[in-house]
């Protein structure tokens, strides 16, 4: 790590049993049962968890970018994240995703600018850039 970087937070979890297991955080704020995607199990799955985390992070990035542009961020802004788990004969398992963003009350061009800037600054978006096909749509 560069001396100019500062770690702001470290999330810590302990997981057992894989996709049909259990995961909890070291502070016990997160305690979840895991199930295979599409199964009859009662737990969640990594794709849902990633979609939830990414949508929260993306909303935060949009708030910061709106502020930087001097735009009042709508209280009812929302991100619907969809994360697909796929499998290809050539490359094996992969993820692809869609972020459907609602910024009610904002001029469409301004809202689109906020979405584009946020996709460049959101840590989740940055971490998967070049590895996951992502579509962002302003709805």
Image (spheres, grey):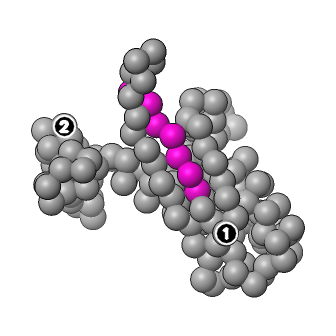
Please state the horizontal and vertical placement of residue 40, each as a whole percent of the image: 14, 55
Q: Nearer the viewer, residue 74 or 123?
A: 74
Residue topped by disc 1: 139
Residue topped by disc 2: 18
When the figure is inspected, residue 122 is found, relative to residue 55, above or below; the finding is above
Q: Quadrant of the N terminus?
A: top right
Is residue 94 found inside the magenta-colored segment of the image? yes
Compared across the picture, whether 44 is left or right of 137 comes to left
Residue under the image location 26 percent in, 47 percent down: 37
> Can residue 126 be seen?
yes
Mark 2, other Cα within 10 Å: few <14 / some 14–19 / many ≥20: few
Q: Main secondary structure of the magenta part?
A: strand
Residue under the image location 13 percent in, 55 percent down: 41
Residue under the image location 60 percent in, 43 percent down: 134
Please state the horizontal and vertical placement of residue 79, each as a whole percent of the image: 56, 66
Helix, strand or loop at label 2? It is helix
Residue 57: quarter of image: bottom right
When the figure is inspected, residue 27 is found, relative to residue 97, above or below; the finding is below
Residue lying farthest to the front in this orientation: 89
When the figure is inspected, residue 92 is found, relative to residue 12, above or below; the finding is above
Is residue 26 found inside the magenta-colored segment of the image? no
Compared across the picture, whether 133 is left or right of 120 comes to left
The answer for how far apart the CA atoms under marks 1 and 2 are is 35 Å
Q: Nearer the viewer, residue 53 or 133?
A: 133
Q: Quadrant of the C terminus?
A: bottom right
Please state the horizontal and vertical placement of residue 82, each as a whole percent of the image: 48, 54
Marks 1, 2: nearer the viewer: 1
Magenta region, residue range: 93-99
> Can residue 23 be seen?
no
Please state the horizontal and vertical placement of residue 24, each as a whole percent of the image: 22, 53
């Amino acid at each position: 790590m560069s001396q100019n970087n500062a770690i702001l937070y470290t999330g810590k979890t302990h997981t057992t049993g894989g996709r049909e297991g259990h995961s909890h955080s070291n502070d016990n704020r997160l305690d979840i049962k895991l199930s295979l995607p599409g199964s009859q199990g009662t737990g969640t799955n990594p794709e849902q968890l990633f979609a939830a985390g990414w949508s929260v992070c993306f909303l935060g990035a949009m708030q910061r970018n709106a502020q930087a542009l001097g735009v009042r961020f709508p209280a009812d802004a929302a991100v619907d994240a969809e994360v697909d788990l796929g499998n290809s004969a050539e490359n094996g398992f992969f993820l692809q995703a869609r972020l459907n963003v609602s910024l009610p009350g904002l001029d469409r061009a301004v809202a689109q600018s906020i979405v584009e800037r946020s996709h460049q600054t959101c840590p989740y978006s940055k971490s998967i850039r070049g590895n996951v096909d992502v579509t962002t749509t302003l709805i």
